[in-house]
Image (cartoon, coloured by chain):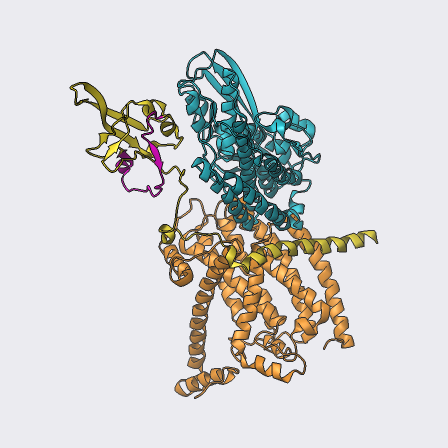
Chain colours: A yellow, B cyan, C orange
Amino acid sequence: MKSILKYFSEIFYGVKSLLGGMRVTGSYFFRPSTIVTQKYPENRDSLVMFDRFKGEVVMPHNEKNEHKCTGCGICEINCPNGTIEIISKMVETEDGKKKKAIDKHIYRLGMCTFCGLCVKTCPSNALAFGQEFEHAVFDRSELIKVLNQPGSQLEKGVE
Amino acid sequence: MENVLNSTVEEQQEYIINMGPQHPSTHGVLRLVLSLKGETVLSVEPHIGYIHRGIEKMCESITYPQIIHLTDRMDYLSAHINNEAVCLAVEKALDVEVPERVKYIRTIMAELTRIQSHQLWWASFGMDLGALTCFFYGLRDREKILDIFEETTGGRMIVSYNCPGGLMYDIHPNFQTRVKEFISYFRKILPEYNQLLTDNVIFHERSKGMGVLTREDAIAFGITGPSARASGFSCDVRKHEPYSAYDKVKINEIMYSAGDTFHRYTARIDEMWESMNIIEQLIDNIPEGPFFVKMKPVVKLPEGEYYQRVETARGELGVYIISDGNKNPYRIKFRSPNFSNLWVMNHISKGNKIADLVAISGSLDLVIPDIDR
Amino acid sequence: MSFNIYDLTSFTEWIHNSLSQAMSPGWVTVTEMVIVGVAFLTFYAIVGLFLVYAERKVCAFMQNRLGPNRVGPFGLFQTIADLTKLLFVELVSIRKADKVLFNLAPFIVIIASFMAIAAIPFAKGLHAIDLNIGVLYVLAVSSLGVIGILLAGWSSNNKYSLIGAMRSGAQVVSYELSVGLSLLTIVVLAGTMQLSEIVEAQRHGWFIFTGHIPAFIAFVIFIISSTAETNRGPFDLAEAESELTAGFHTEYSGIKFAFFFLAEYINMFIVASIASTLFLGGWMPLHIGSWEGFNNVMDFIPPFFWYLGKTGFIIFIMMWFKWTFPRLRIDQLLKLEWKYLLPINLVNILLMALIVLLEWHF
């Protein structure tokens, strides 16, 4: 007798638990407002990344086309993957002294692991993270970027 | 193994099947060589090394702050906790006391990491059992934590938030409100998880009494984390050897004694509740202060050996550093929880069906890049 | 010539008569067979493609997703795009596979489902053959598909496929029993095996209402066991994505895979049609006792839409199952059949016989 009762109570509780599961999925089915999918290429205009989002390393320039990079090479030393390469040149300052300055700040996006050490260790805050994330290209060589804009100068007062 | 290969089918009635390296339920590139009789598993032989990147060797040629970006990629689901382990080891070696604020933030982030890791585990465990909807619910809720991470650290999974001596940046001003929002949201959602999968009679049938791991075996195999605690082996590093701010909070160690798939499952579900409790104890009390200690530009550890263990989402992670006084470690060794947890598979899945093997390997919650490193 | 959309008998008779005037009786039969064949092929393709789309949309909404939304409005043409792609996929030949059986298997699966569709009454006077043993025919034909699955698993020369096929064999053979017995419950109530008469007998109330509890139990058992018979989740052990990668069709590619894929959906459609015909009155509108006004309003909806609506409802329930429950293990699957469904079913038939003898039904 006991086993028969157990047999039927097993069926009862089994069916009950199954219906509980179906209630969850069913309730979501009838509530399309809970959909979390973003329609990506369409929402490009309204899509805002967080300000700290690490999309790529950039070198901010001011409106006079000046950057803060002195070409010291600390970012190059700190980078664990050899992503950054700095090519420096010697320039003559106004008072006739020769001074090391940056020629090309080469950044290989394809190798970057976004650890943030270059941005953090830069003594003159010349580097920052950009929020751009659409990096797909057809040619790998396009991933090698020169961060300082052509013709840019070192900002006054940055040593 | 050789016996099986040399004898004919008539004699042996077993056959060998390769599960992986490309298989939906090995969650990565793990290869399991199964010897089967019908559907019954006679033995499981894990073959590893398909995603070996030589992280330990690579660490020998880079500086201590740079190691962080490699430990991120070991157990990518508890990236923050891995980083914390390295940082704690380095800080211990240098005898640096980090500010209270750092300790609190590290603990909160670690617990968030634990929750998101368990969410993904729940998602993929449901998928292993054939309940595909779990996968999407788990990922949907994990997204909320990843957004919190992204806002503060700039990374979603690979956060790179710790550095020896503190944190890379301070927390975002929205951090506290967002975390509280998430907790109140997730407290409502977790019962739904239970309704969908935990209470399901099919799930009970599939998981109860399957792959029983006794306490003795758990200790003998070196199992740690929720998998061991489900067998009654008290091994929570957070409780036994508190680091960061864990000594300031009340932690309930989740313990079960049955040690089957079902209890490994419930142990993780309960850990999510417990993690939320821990975060709630800390989130309003984050002390003001600096978020890092000024370190020397080049971190050099004094000669010696240093060991630090932490509790990741999967178990105990140990970092063992030998320094010869240089800026690079002489040798670094990670005692990764997944490596130990993997080898118990043969022991506990013998005699079960293929379907149970999938459930068991899911309940051990393996992350393959952490096994191979 | 005007047609009554509520009774398509005149329409089919008109076709028959006009053909008879034009050609000899032998040719009339041939022409009619061709017409029916082409009509069913078109119907088959449309239903298959639509069901794939519907399944993807339903599961997406259950999972907080949007589902297909790129090709065409609301992604309606997504499945057509997928099918086009499958047509161009290379048919990979498997080394050491049994070529003949390997190529034959998808056709057996698809022909079995194609044959079953012939006996289903879509609306009044709209079915291909009205066999007097319709229920038996459908049962017999729909279980042929498992041969195709077994052949596919065996001939692929792949252990995963073989395990899947063997599972499927054990599963279909045992669940066949439950399907048959639950349908027999209704046959006892209706007193006939002819599908058109079964529908006609439900004019004053669908069997699921008039048959008291036994009919309802039979309905539930039929839904469960027919889900198992069509190899759908939570009984999709033959495919078992997380265990056997893709089960019996692991080695199939391109259009051969598409055949398996379409056959699964058509099978689902067929069992849903049978369920709606036997339990929910097929194309018969919903009538409640003597509510004349209500009955007239219900009669206004054409029978074909009644049929589609009921079938769609059952298909939705089957999808709901699939996207909620975890998969069973093979021994639990057989336990469910032999320990629970079969005994309940046998008692259920006795109860139904009792009810019919004592004339307790409405």
Q: Closest to the observer: C87 or B322?
A: B322
Which quadrant is home to the C terminus of chain C? bottom right
Which quadrant is home to the N terminus of chain C? bottom left
Against C66, residue B310 (above or below) is above
- Left or right of A55: which side holds C201? right
- Left or right of A142: which side holds B171? right
Q: Name the dominant secondary structure of the magenta segment.
A: loop
> How far across and down, in percent of the image, does residue B92 sit?
53, 18
Which residue is at a point 52% across and 82% down the rendered structure image? C6
Against C173, residue C245 (above or below) is above
Which residue is at a point 58% across and 53% down the rendered structure image? C324
> How far across and down, in percent of the image, does residue B145 sit?
51, 41
Q: Closest to the observer: C323 or C345?
A: C323
- Left or right of A132: which side holds B126? right
> How far across and down, in percent of the image, does residue C359 sit?
76, 77
Q: In which quarter of the image is residue B364?
A: top right
Can residue A52 be seen?
yes
Numbered range of the magenta stretch: A122-145
Against B200, residue B330 (above or below) is above
Residue A127, magenta (yes or no) = yes
- Left or right of B235: which side holds C82? left
Q: Closest to the observer: C228 or A41?
A: A41
Residue A66, magenta (yes or no) = no
> How far across and down, in percent of the image, does residue A155 sit?
25, 29
Can residue B238 be seen?
no
